[in-house]
Amino acid sequence: MACGAEEKLDAGAKVERAFERLGEERAVAVEFALDADADAAHAALKEGRDGKRGIDRAAAGILADLKLRYAVVSDEPPEERNGGEDAHRASAAGRLARKDGTILAELRSVDRRMYLRGDIKAFAAMARPGNAADRSERRAFEEALKRIDRMPDSLAAVRDALKGKWVVLDAREFEEAAKRERERDGDAGLFGEPDAKTRKRVADALRKALTDHAKTEDTGKRNGAEHVKVTVPARTAAGRLAEALKPLEKQLRAAGRGEDPGAPRKVPDKDVVFDVALKGGRLSAVTVDMAALDADIRAPLPLTVGFAGASVEVDAPSGARKLSAREMTEALMRMMGVDADGLGGADRGL
């Protein structure tokens, strides 16, 4: 179908073609964020599952303030990848940030090298102690921060990584660790590189979620995007979405409540409405009220999934210190207050 004929397509065909294009892109970025403030997120999640206590307002505020972004860039589009030796050499990136742009943690995989950084103080700033137990945990955390500052110069790369500066993991050590993780968990790890077939599968599952048994309606243009209202049976959509989100399951658990966000256990037997935003015939964003997909969510909780394609880049950051697995292990033990002598290291006294 010619791209120049997009304006002649009906609403359903526009959505289907947009998802087909998503699967054809060399570069794709997906960003997840709740379109809710702390009060709205708390109202939706405070009761929890099966009548158990959910999350408090402070935790709801943290969740509402997060954005999770995942990007993959390949040299060739999915249909041209041959699945050979270079099939897993796409560049990939994962980033957890606050909505104001503060980066909490970021990883990039470029040319078989893994770069990472995290801002542990920025994480701490998101939590405000509300009771004695919270204050005790905060004091313990502050002690761990002091141990970071007292780390010897031999662990300077670790200090950098925990203070928002880039470090690069030893490629050979990382590949060995990643291989062990894949053998153990059967997946690509927290920010692994999905192959072309996996990315195509995700796009196809998303397309089916919003086109199978769907009713579509053009709702006009807003903020430079053409919007289409897509109405589908909630249970059908939930199953397709669970399939689509499975490759990102670990990342979403890490950013959320430790649960599987792609598999609601109580899907209402009713229709759910998706707002699909299109720009230039390409998918720009999809917004859905998660309460329509999960009866355990007690109030409206809009989730927006943003998409980007051709402009996405994943570059190796400059000035990154090299970080070894040994340094990571020693630093972790020091943060927990374990004597470095137990690791065979020097600088015992902290």
Image (cartoon, helix red, strand yellow):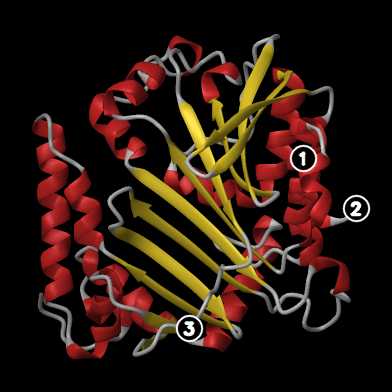
Nearer the observer: mark 1 or 3; the answer is: 1
Q: Nearer the viewer, residue 73 or 280?
A: 280
* 299 over 332 or under it: above or below: above
Measure how far apart labels 1 and 3 are at the Cα level: 36 Å
Residue 29: percent from left, percent from top: 58, 59
Mark 2 residue type? Met
Residue 267 horizontal side relative to residue 298, left or right:
right
Measure how far apart labels 2 and 1 are at the Cα level: 11 Å
Report the residue marked by disc 2: 1
Q: Residues within 10 Å of mark 3 (few under 14, many from 20)?
A: some
Q: Quadrant of residue 16?
A: top right
Residue 291: percent from left, percent from top: 52, 18
Q: Residues within 10 Å of mark 2 (few under 14, many from 20)?
A: few
Residue 36 horizontal side relative to residue 275, left or right:
left
Image quadrant containing the C terminus: bottom left
Report the residue marked by disc 1: 14
Contact, mark 2 vs mark 3 (Cβ under 8 Å): no
Q: Which residue is rendered at x = 35% and y = 36% of the image? A: 64
Q: Which residue is rendered at x = 77% and y = 55% of the image? A: 21
Mark 3 residue type? Ala
User: Element at badge 2?
Assistant: loop
Q: Earlier in the sequence, mark 2 or mark 3?
A: 2
Report the residue marked by disc 3: 316
Q: Earlier in the sequence, mark 2 or mark 1?
A: 2
